[in-house]
Image (tube, coloured by chain):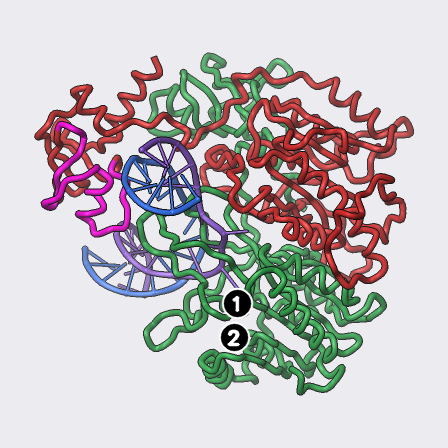
Chain colours: A green, B red, C purple, D blue
Amino acid sequence: MKTLPDESVDLIFADPPYNLQLGGDLHRPDNSKVDAVDNDWDQIGDFDAYDLFSCAWLEEARRVLKPNGAMWTIGSYHNIFRVGSFLQDMGFWIRNDVIWRKSNPMPNFKGTRFTNAHETLIWASKTKDAKPTFNYAAMKALNDGVQMRSDWTLPICAGGERLKNKEGKKAHPTQKPESLLHRVLLATSNPGDLVLDPFFGTGTTGAVAKKLGRHYIGIEADPTYADVARKRIAAINPTSEDLLQVTQSKRALPRIAFGSLVEAGLLKPGDTLYCSQGRRTAQVRADGTVIAGGQAGSIHQMGAHVQGAPSCNGWTFWHVRQGGALAPIDVLRARIRAELQV
Amino acid sequence: MKTLPDESVDLIFADPPYNLQLGGDLHRPDNSKVDAVDNDWDQIGDFDAYDLFSCAWLEEARRVLKPNGAMWTIGSYHNIFRVGSFLQDMGFWIRNDVIWRKSNPMPNFKGTRFTNAHETLIWASKTKDAKPTFNYAAMKALNDGVQMRSDWTLPICAGGERLKNKEGKKAHPTQKPESLLHRVLLATSNPGDLVLDPFFGTGTTGAVAKKLGRHYIGIEADPTYADVARKRIAAINPTSEDLLQVTQSKRALPRIAFGSLVEAGLLKPGDTLYCSQGRRTAQVRADGTVIAGGQAGSIHQMGAHVQGAPSCNGWTFWHVRQGGALAPIDVLRARIRAELQV
DNA sequence: TCCCCATTTGAATCGGACT
DNA sequence: CAGTCCGATTCAAATGGGG
């Protein structure tokens, strides 16, 4: 990076080591072992060492970035707060933080935390007054005609896209999906621009840059990764129709948990639910379970329980009293759905 | 906050001002503890005051929080990276960063950025080794039976929930939705706990705490906001205690020794246990150990032994013959537990 | 060729009570 | 405080084999 001239690149995408601090081995409930990121390159050290490392590469990034260039970084809660603070301290101006919302994250196997289902990207310009590229209309088109939001729901890199080594194992433990880079490059660069990735890995940034007609520079310390990246990018046909591809955003009908009704205040803990006849009742608890017939469980389980049935759709079985009459709780769900649809 | 005793609160929810630069109406507290700031950062002018302010209230928060208490903060990209870094520097241990994904955010009117559609929360414990409350099973129940993720889709505070002043304008510019606090308090506190909100505003934290049977302390500098909060919370009827019980994790259930089953006569020495396929067997001994694969030990040890697995839950691995079919010995444990309840 | 079911896997700061 | 041992704990998507 030191060899690059000042103010020479249009966009930097940096996926630095996260400096994960893992304990012992982690096993799934079926006793299989999780293939964790325990590579040496991720073990930077304590916060002081990581801060020194971060400042060093960020200073170089700042030097080589054009005045109106785009600065992107990605990270998790382990490192992103530190990187974000340094960006601000150095005078970068944050335009957005963007959430990569994983559609298929790894679960929390021990039941100790929320599923770690996202990573955070930061899009910054070099200064407050800079005029970085932002292809607003392209983003809107990519998002079915409505403004692109700061949360992007994309699957993790798997299947045929995931590069394997000779042993059939993943070639890199943290390969990013091309869809993510596609959106980054399409949004904040133009064809012919020069893109720099100082942590190239297996070259996702280069692959997408080539497909989208951007030039690229990739820096990678590990020769094995660099070799994989070279072969990968060489196999890409730059004149293909890939240039026209856009990732489709899937907008499935959102699933609504019964607990959402309690959170939203449409139902309160202690409220009574009735069957359509009004003879069976259930009481709502704070976590979205209900008590009926002396047991606690979901609206579906307890609907089945009081009927002695194998299953039950609680949304249509249980009712609330509305102005003297009984209305199925499905009408409350419809109200939540209406709010969620922008 | 200075008047509160050390290690006295179970949960802190802090919604600090997001940025000194933008509002300009952020006043540094007169009693800010400058000597507590031991960071040696090379700060850029505008962030200095905000950092001093942040460190001051975070240090106090750390002092009053119980060793196993929960620390929550919320913010946007303007301030959350700084707050998150300070939390780490002070020794807080981040458990999750959580994304509040707004279903109805304000659009970006000028088309210059992505719609700012989320805010970031940080859930941290006081130290790495702390054992904070996490109601895993309740969160899973609230999310329709699947593990709660780190991204929460909830609408912004609007409609009847949004407090208005006499002129019909919003009483507070950044009132948080009760649904957000509901999830925070339900996940990481228990009924009877003491919740502190050092930036109380119009009292959303207090309102939800009262509804969920948590005690609360709210600190608010602006008397107008404090007045709104007092009236708002006074109008709330607390929920009766028994309905605040939430789905319990199995870890919270009383522990039953396998030997209890032998003592109670549910199993006899010499009885045979089977794996679910019936191919592996074990023999029960009088002291609650079993013999399998030529060795003797606990049901867990022998379950792991015959599978060649690192560990095993013997309660679900081993079965007994009941009327021709196989049933896990866990059903026998359930019978003992039911008797203990009486 | 298609459907079904079992298997595999992904940036993870992943337990806790008792001796 | 370290060691021991009980025993709780997973979701979405891709892959691959059998019918």
Please tell me how crowded label 2 is: few (under 14), some (14-19), or many (20+) other residues with Cα within 10 Å: many
- B280 left or right of B106 in image: left
Is residue B298 one of those drawn in magenta? yes
What chain does mark 1 sit on?
Answer: A
Contact? badges 2 and 1 (CB < 8 Å): yes
What's the CA distance linking mark 2 and mark 1? Answer: 9 Å
Is B50 above or below relative to A58?
Answer: above
Q: Which residue is mark 1?
A: A176
Residues shaded magenta: B286-314
Tag 1: residue type?
A: Lys
In the foreground, D1 or A35: D1
Q: In which quadrant of the rendered view does residue A261 lie?
A: top right
Give residue A196's mark.
none
Whichever of callouts 2 and 1 sits on the residue coming sooner in the sequence is: 1
Q: Residue at x 81, y 71 (%)?
A: A131
In the foreground, A193 or B110: A193
In the foreground, A135 or B49: B49
- A160 left or right of B104 in image: left
- B42 left or right of B266 in image: right
Residue A53: horizontal and vertical position, in percent? 62, 70
Residue B72: horizontal and vertical position, in percent? 64, 41
Q: Residue furthest right?
A: B167
- Is circle 2 on the same chain as circle 1? yes
Q: Residue at x 50, y 26 (%)?
A: B246
Residue A281: horizontal and vertical position, in percent? 48, 16
Q: Which residue is mark 2?
A: A201
Residue B173: horizontal and vertical position, in percent? 82, 39
Quarter of the image that includes the N terminus of chain B: top right
